[in-house]
Amino acid sequence: MPEKYYWFPAMAIYPVATAPVIASVPTVDLSTDAGDFYIDIAALTSLNIGNRHLMTYSATIDRDDICNLSCTAPGKYVVSPLKEGLATLTVNASYRGVTATGYIDLSVDYGAGLSEVKVECTDSDVYGIDGTLLLRDASPEDIDRLPAGFYIIGRRKIYKANH
C-alpha cells in the first residue's frame, strides 16, 4: 500500500534581502497654475531579487508650505504646488527591512503669468496641443468659439481664455 505523503513544489527562498533601487529623477519644474505632478514610486523602483509585491513605499516633502503631498494608492503620490519656492521630495522603497531612499528636487514658480493674449489673424488651421487638426481654415470667429485651452494656430502655441 502506498504511503501517504504530500509533495509540493519548493518555494523560492531569498536568503538575503537586497535593497530596492530607485531611479534618479532630475529636478522637476512645477508651476502654480499648471496643476499637479503625479509620481509613481513603484514604477521608478526595481528589485534585483525578490517579490516586488511585498515592497512598501513612502514619501515626504520637506517644505509643505511650498507643495502639498498626498497618497492616491500604494506607491502613487500627487504633488500639488502651492507657492513659489524650492522643496525636496524624499521617496522610500522598502523590501524585507532594507530601504532605499531617493530625493527629487522640486522647483515651483508662479507660471507664465499670462492673463490674455490677443492675436490678429487671418484664416488658418487650428491644431490641438497633441497635433490633431481641429479646424481647417478657421476664421477669428471660429477660434473665438473654441473652449479655453492651448492650441497651435499658425505655427504658434496659443492659450485661449474664455471671456
Image (cartoon, rainbow, N blue to C red):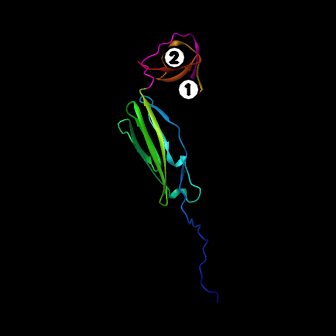
Q: Is residue 57 above or below residue 154?
A: below
Residue at the spot 54% in from the left edge and 46% down from the top edge? 44
Within 10 Å of disc 2 (Cα), the crowding (few <14, some 14-19, many 20+) is some
- Picture coordinates of residue 86 (x, y %)? 42, 34
- What secondary structure is the magenta-colored segment mainly? loop
Residue at 42%, 19% in the rendered image: 115
Q: Is residue 118 highlighted in magenta?
A: yes
Say which residue label 2 marks.
143
Distance between mark 1 and mark 2 Cα atoms: 15 Å
Amino acid at pointer 1: Ile
Residue 103 drawn at (x, y percent): 48, 43
Q: Are marks 1 and 2 in contact (CB under 8 Å)?
A: no
Magenta stretch in the rendered image: 111-130
Q: Residue furthest left?
A: 65
Q: Quadrant of the C terminus?
A: top left
Q: Is residue 162 magenta?
A: no
Q: Which mark is residue 129?
A: 1
Q: Is residue 69 depicted above or below 115 in this figure? A: below
Identify the residue at horizontal 59%, vertical 84% (top origin): 4
Locate the N terminus and report the quarter of the image it occupies: bottom right
Point 58% across, 12% down: residue:
123
Q: Residues within 10 Å of mark 1 (few under 14, many from 20)?
A: some
**Of marks 1 and 2, which one's residue comes earlier in the chain?**
1
